[in-house]
Amino acid sequence: MRHKADQDEYLARLVEREIAHARAMSLAEEVRPVDDPMSKYVPWIFVAVILLATVATGASLLAVVFA
């Protein structure tokens, strides 16, 4: 009976080691997202679009008023 208990204990430790190894490999292979190089320009693009829209609207209103 002792041999069976030793086998069960050995298998339990082996399974635990395999699970730990699989988790470690999974974490090691995890791909980290790369920062978008254009993301630093997004606020400036937003400002430029708003500014362009404002200028176009103003020019349009001035054209109507002084036409």
Image (cartoon, grey):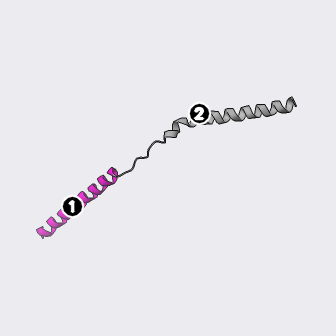
Pointer 1 residue: 14
Q: Between residue 29 and residue 20, name the one nearer to us.
A: 29
Name the residue located 78 percent from the left edge and 31 percent from the top edge. Answer: 59
The stretch in magenta equals: 1-28
Residue 60 sits above or below residue 21 on the image: above
Query: Among all residues in the image, which is located at the extreme left?
Result: 2
Measure the C-alpha gap from mark 2 to mark 1.
57 Å
On whether residue 7 falls in the magenta region, the answer is: yes
Q: Quadrant of the N terminus?
A: bottom left
**Image side of residue 54 versus residue 13, left or right:** right
Q: In this picture, is 34 found above or below 57?
A: below
In the rendered view, would you say 1 is above or below 46? below
| Residue 12, image x, y percentages | 22, 62
Residue 44 % position (x, y): 59, 33
Query: Splitting the image into 4 quarters, where does residue 66 fall?
Result: top right
Instruction: Where is residue 35? Give x, y as percent.
Output: 46, 42
Residue 49: x and y, percent? 66, 36
Q: For label 1, count other residues whose C-alpha is less than 10 Å away and answer few (under 14), some (14-19) or many (20+).
A: few
Label 2: which secondary element: helix
Q: Find disc 2 in the rendering and name its residue.
A: 44
Q: Main secondary structure of the magenta part?
A: helix
Q: Which sits in the foreground, 42 or 26? A: 42
Instruction: Name the kind of residue labelled 2 in the image.
Output: Trp
